[in-house]
Image (cartoon, rainbow, N blue to C red):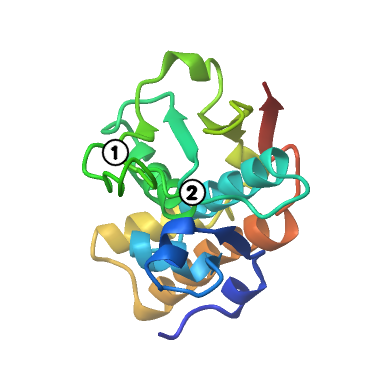
Amino acid sequence: MDYPAFFDQAPAITMHDGLAELLGACSDGLITYRYIDAVRLAGHSCPTVAAAYLMARRALRILYPDQIPERGMLQVSLAAAREEGVTGVTASVIGLITGAAGAGGFKGIGGNFRRQDLLRFGAAEVGSGELRVERSDTGAGVTLQARLARVPPDPRTGALLQAILAGQATPEQAAQFAVLWQERVRKILVEHADDPELIVSSLQ
């Protein structure tokens, strides 16, 4: 897969997955996720995918400050309904990393490693945030919101996209749009990965 070089510059996220260790997927249970994994899941790279990836990372760094996060031991609640806006995309990326799944998720083995119903939508407890991530073992939780206006798009992207959608763009214009689009994603992931004004968090 040929992809922009900055995908590999984005911060990685390492998790411990007890189920993966039990079933022999990896001997130590450690799984490292990279931005390219989120792109493969979503099928594209955009500010929403990048923001979801960074929200997962921020939540895990807050909830597990001195240890490797435990995949499958996190409940994710989103404020919006599943079908609203880009909520489904955000949930997919968050679920990939945390292991949280909806009704179709893994039901567990002997009462352990359940991922089913750890991903919920339309959750009132999120309050004014976008989503909440909570540890199943301690109950500690963090509410997060992505403020993508912090990294605005290049002013040329709107007109270029309209030309593409109307079938009026030249190959050069289409290529320029793609470059400009991914440049915004690069800024989000690389230049603003730890920006508290991009990913706003509140520990509760």
Q: How far across and how far down the image is residue 161, in percent?
A: 38, 58
Name above or below for residue 9 compared with residue 186: below
The residue drawn where x is 42% and y is 44% is 90
Where does the C terminus fall, quadrant-wise?
top right
| Left or right: 121, with 83 as reference point | right
**Could you tell me if the residues under marks 2 and 1 are in contact, i.e. CB atoms within 8 Å?**
no
28 and 183: which is toward the camera: 28
68 and 51: which is toward the camera: 68
Residue ranking furthest to the bottom: 2
Q: How far across and how far down the image is residue 125, in percent?
A: 49, 15
In what element is the residue under mark 2? helix
139 and 2: which is toward the camera: 139
Neighbor class of circle 2 (other Cα within 10 Å; few <14, some 14-19, many 20+) is many
Q: Mark 2 highlights which residue?
A: 98
| Left or right: 200, with 110 as reference point | right
The residue drawn where x is 28% and y is 48% is 106
For badge 2, the amino acid type reads Thr
Which labelled disc corresponds to residue 185?
Answer: none
| Left or right: 107, with 29 as reference point | left
Q: Mark 1 highlights which residue?
A: 102
For badge 1, the amino acid type reads Gly
| Left or right: 183, with 117 as reference point | right
Q: How many marks?
A: 2
The residue drawn where x is 35% and y is 43% is 114
The residue drawn where x is 61% and y is 62% is 14
In what element is the residue under mark 1? loop
Neighbor class of circle 1 (other Cα within 10 Å; few <14, some 14-19, many 20+) is some
Q: How far across and how far down the image is residue 107, in percent?
A: 26, 44
Q: CA distance from mark 2 to mark 1?
A: 12 Å
Name above or below for residue 179 compared with residue 68: below
